Structures are given as structure tokens and as C-alpha cells.
């Protein structure tokens, strides 16, 4: 048997369940695996779960260099239509860049609810950021910097790319711009989740997004003992409980 192009344990996953479908979107340079704990919790509650692999992810970092922000949005639309074919209503959830995609999707597609985890309102402050327009076309890459994991076991088991290719970072910036245009157009209920210990995104991200979201039904949920990949961290059970309450309210 030939070796898979997809990184081991990083495959997309689908868990059949009830009439409500949950679309789970992973982060930038991440994989569907980072959504697995959340997916299992939702499936245990009887929901149908789909976690797609975003374009250019979970294979080789070089594959990301071909990605454009439109490719990632198209992956989300694919996931929505797949879930629509087997469920009656759909909710979208995403981590980090997956949260950015979640908010764009909530403005464009008839999701009944949206949940973000560690969604970024802008790229983090970095002196190298000003050089991106010059570095992007050169197909270089930049290091990820110091990790903010609080769960050592999850950190060891995490699967992602070891660095950021520069060109896709430019595409991420364009995607964030698209999100800001979309935020006032969101009308479905929204739950935003962030940790005070997240050092990957700007600390004001969740509040910035909250202020711009057009929905009259929006809530924020802070946790204290987790890093950026918040749904694999020590606070995950509290987060899953909050997501469960949100789902029950949305579907009531």
C-alpha cells in the first residue's frame, strides 16, 4: 500500500448522528485532529459531526503555498453542503483561522448558530509583518515562536506544520479583511470563546469581534487555564459544557 499524502492522524472525519449537523473548522497550519475532542463530545450528545481538511493543510507545508483565501472559504461551503444533505439544520464552529472562516460562513450561509474558539481579529503584532509583501512571493517561511500549551500530553500529540509559509500568511490577512466586512451581516446566534492565557492572538480579539458582529444574540465566554488550541487544553470540559448550553438555546 502506498503512503498516504495526508499526515498520520490528521485525516478529516465524519461522525453520523442526529438531525443537527456541526461543521468543525481547524486552524491555520493545523489539521482536523485539533477538532477531534470537540467532535467526540458533540457526537456523544447526539449531533452529526463533520471536520473537513482545509486546502493545503495536513499534507506538506509546500502545499500551502498554492492556497488562496478563496480556497479555504470554498472548503467550508463544501462542508456545509455535505452536512445539508444529511441533516436538517447546521451549526458552524472553528478554531483560530477556523473561527475567522466560521464568521464569514455565518454571514453567507443559513447556519442556525456559530461558535468560535481563539478566533483572531487581526494578525499578531510582529516586526516581521511589515516585510510580508516582500517575503511572500519569495516562498520563505517564518518560525512559530514560543508555544503557549498548558496540556503537555496534548502538545506532544498535536499535529500541524512546524512553521508558517509566508505567502499563505498574506492570504490569511486577506481572509481576516473579508471577515471584518462580513461581521455586521451576521444574524444567527454566536458564541465566542477565548483564553486569557492565549499568547498567539491579540488579547482584545474576542472583544473586537463581539463589538462588530451584527447579531442581537451573541455571547462571550472566557477561560483562564488554556493556551491557543483551547479545545485540547485543561479548560476544554468547561468549554464543551458552554457549547452544549449554547446549542440547546439555539435549537430550543
Image: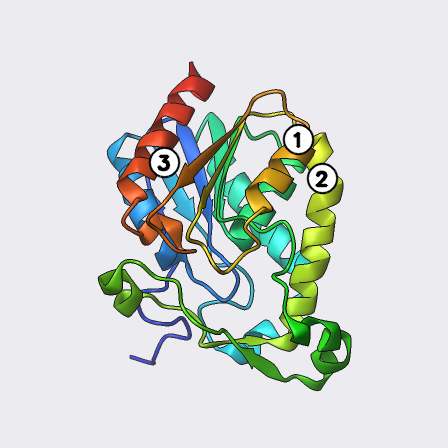
Q: Is residue 17 visible?
A: no
The spot of residue 134 in percent (x, y) is 77, 80
Which residue is denoted by mark 2 in the rendering?
182
Q: Marks 3 and 1, how far apart in space?
A: 23 Å
The residue that appears at 36% across and 45% down in the rendered structure is 224
Give me the disc on residue 186.
Answer: 1
The spot of residue 71 in percent (x, y) is 64, 59
Relative to 22, say whether 61 is above or below: below
Q: Residues within 10 Å of mark 2 (few under 14, many from 20)?
A: some
Q: Is residue 203 visible?
A: yes
Picture quadrant where residue 172 is located: bottom right
**Quadrant housing the C terminus:** top left
Are dots 1 and 2 in contact, CB under 8 Å? Answer: yes
The residue that appears at 53% across and 51% down in the rendered structure is 98
Q: Residues within 10 Å of mark 3 (few under 14, many from 20)?
A: many
The spot of residue 70 in percent (x, y) is 69, 56
Colouring convention used in this rendered image of the protein:
rainbow
Q: Earlier in the sequence, mark 2 or mark 3?
A: 3
Are dots 3 and 1 in contact, CB under 8 Å? Answer: no
Helix, strand, or loop for circle 1? Answer: loop
Relative to 19, say whether 41 is above or below: below
Which residue is denoted by mark 3 in the rendering?
48
Helix, strand, or loop for circle 3? Answer: strand
Give me the disc on residue 15.
Answer: none
Picture quadrant where residue 229 is located: bottom left
The spot of residue 110 in percent (x, y) is 61, 29
Relative to 35, say whether 219 is above or below: above
Q: Marks 2 and 3, how far apart in space?
A: 27 Å
Amino acid at each position: 500500500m502506498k503512503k498516504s499524502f495526508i499526515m498520520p492522524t490528521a485525516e478529516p472525519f465524519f461522525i453520523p448522528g442526529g438531525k443537527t449537523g456541526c461543521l468543525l473548522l481547524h486552524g491555520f497550519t493545523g489539521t482536523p485532529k485539533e477538532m477531534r475532542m470537540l467532535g467526540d463530545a458533540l457526537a456523544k450528545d447526539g449531533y452529526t459531526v463533520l471536520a473537513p481538511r482545509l486546502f493545503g493543510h495536513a499534507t506538506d507545508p509546500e502545499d500551502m503555498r498554492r492556497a488562496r483565501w478563496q480556497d479555504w472559504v470554498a472548503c467550508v461551503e463544501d462542508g456545509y453542503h455535505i452536512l445539508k444533505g444529511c441533516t436538517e439544520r447546521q451549526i458552524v464552529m472553528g478554531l483560530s483561522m477556523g473561527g475567522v472562516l466560521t464568521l464569514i460562513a455565518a454571514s453567507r450561509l443559513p447556519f442556525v448558530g456559530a461558535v468560535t474558539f481563539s478566533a483572531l481579529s487581526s494578525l499578531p503584532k510582529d516586526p516581521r509583518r511589515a516585510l510580508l509583501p516582500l517575503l511572500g512571493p519569495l516562498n520563505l517561511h517564518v518560525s512559530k515562536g514560543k508555544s503557549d500549551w498548558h496540556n503537555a500530553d496534548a502538545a506532544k500529540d498535536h499535529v500541524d506544520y512546524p512553521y508558517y509559509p509566508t505567502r499563505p500568511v498574506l492570504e490569511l490577512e486577506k481572509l481576516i479583511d473579508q471577515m471584518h466586512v462580513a461581521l455586521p451581516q451576521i444574524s444567527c446566534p454566536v458564541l465566542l470563546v477565548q483564553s486569557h492565557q492565549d499568547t498567539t492572538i491579540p488579547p482584545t480579539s474576542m472583544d473586537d469581534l463581539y463589538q462588530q458582529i451584527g447579531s442581537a444574540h451573541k455571547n462571550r465566554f472566557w477561560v483562564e487555564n488554556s493556551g491557543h488550541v483551547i479545545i485540547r487544553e485543561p479548560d476544554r470540559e468547561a468549554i464543551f459544557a458552554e457549547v452544549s448550553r449554547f446549542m440547546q438555546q439555539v435549537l430550543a
